[in-house]
Amino acid sequence: MNFKLILNIAIHLLRARLKQTLVAAIGVTFGIAMFISLVSFMNGLNDLLDGLMLNRTPHVRLYNEIKPSENQPISLSKKYKNDVNIVNSVKPKDRGKAIYNSKAIVYYLKNDPRVIDVAPKITTPVFFNSGTIEISGVINGIDVSAEEKLFAISDYITIGKITDLDQNNSIIIGKGLADKMLLVKGDIIKITTAKGNLASLKIVGISQIGIAEIDDVSSYTSLDTAQKLLGEATNYITDIQVKLHDMTTAPVVAKEFHTKFNLDTIDYQTANSQFETGSTVRSIISYAVGIVLLIVAGFGIYNILNMMIFEKMDSIAILKATGFSGNDVKWIFILLSMIIGITGGLFGLLFGYIFTHIIDEIPFNTAALPTVTTYPINYNPLFYIIGISFAILTTFIAGLFPALKASKVDPVEIIRGK
């Protein structure tokens, strides 16, 4: 088989039906461009939502959960039911939220090779007071440097800096709280704890995650300030947040830490199962739509090649009569199809990048997400590799069946029929 000769014949056949060839190539181009645009936008949206919630969630969280006492005062077995009253609604055991021996646990976790880093935290309900306004909310006492390293919390600080929390008696409040209480940076806010402790903290910043349920109640202060506010010792923490090098191992690691430290644990998959489900569904939809577009383009190529074979029966008969084998004829039409697919695919990649770049430049202004200024786009090269690979595969399959048909043409019958 003379590849150069077969390629020249394929190109000649393409030129002979240039309009139909362009239509087929444009179909592939459009399919690839839409596939790239859809997948890039959907994955950009998933990355945005992950940044808002999933990436701000520790892979493993260690804490003490309030739960009923395991030792009931009266057994609930059947043999007592006819003799004595059964005691129900036993109150939960008050073991407190504090994690005992927390410094030793944090030290152990920091030296675990599976762990990137650890961020201790205090979470406590409080009342925010400003004049006659009193709003219930939550204070998060954080290790500023560790929290910034693991969760990039400064990305959501719209006014002030996260490092300002290193000042004594300082606090960063949510945008919802600031709007409700008419507070700005530099104001003083009074805090009342559940135990009745009262403190005055200076507002050094305002945060806005974009989720109203969080922005309306949340605030951040340093671990030291939170401990002083609650009147607790310097080793008092309620949560230990862990990030792993391999986040897929979080469920297994969480169970291991639960057994080892006798603490309640929860992994990020369990805590954010709804968000992960939504991201998966969006990705499936975008890939499905893009693949359908490419399949439709493949049918277009199939139809065009079928028509070309019908119209070029004389040429095929002459080729076979002059010494070309059925395999040579088959490869002529496969190459013809592949030229359409590769050309259309390359232009599709180019236009896909242009479309995604245009989307990335479109302003996206919303008060709920002040840190997001344009529509999110993910420029992962893998999307382009998948796009061109699927284009080549689709066009190859679309050209294979007409090519097999052309290879079986009997030149004697065609010439005799003429």
Image: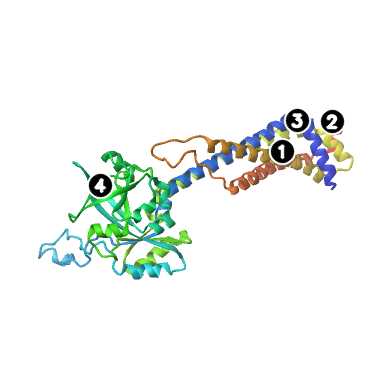
Percent position (x, y) of residue 82? 11, 63
Secondary structure of the residue carrying tag 1 is helix
Residue at the limit of the structure toward the right, as seen here? 322
Residue in the picture at 43% in, 48% down: 155
Mark sitting earlier along the chain (4/1): 4
Secondary structure of the residue carrying tag 4 is strand
Q: Disc 2 marks which residue?
A: 417
Amino acid type at mark 3: Leu
Q: Looking at the image, which is closer to me, 172 or 287?
A: 172
Q: Give the CA distance from mark 1 to mark 3.
A: 11 Å
Residue in the picture at 63% in, 47% down: 385
Q: Give the CA distance from mark 2 to mark 4.
A: 97 Å
- Whether label 3 touches label 4, CB < 8 Å: no
Percent position (x, y) of residue 204? 33, 48
Secondary structure of the residue carrying tag 2 is helix
Percent position (x, y) of residue 298? 65, 38
Amino acid type at mark 4: Ile
Q: Give the CA distance from mark 1 to mark 2.
A: 32 Å
Q: Give the CA distance from mark 4 to mark 1.
A: 68 Å
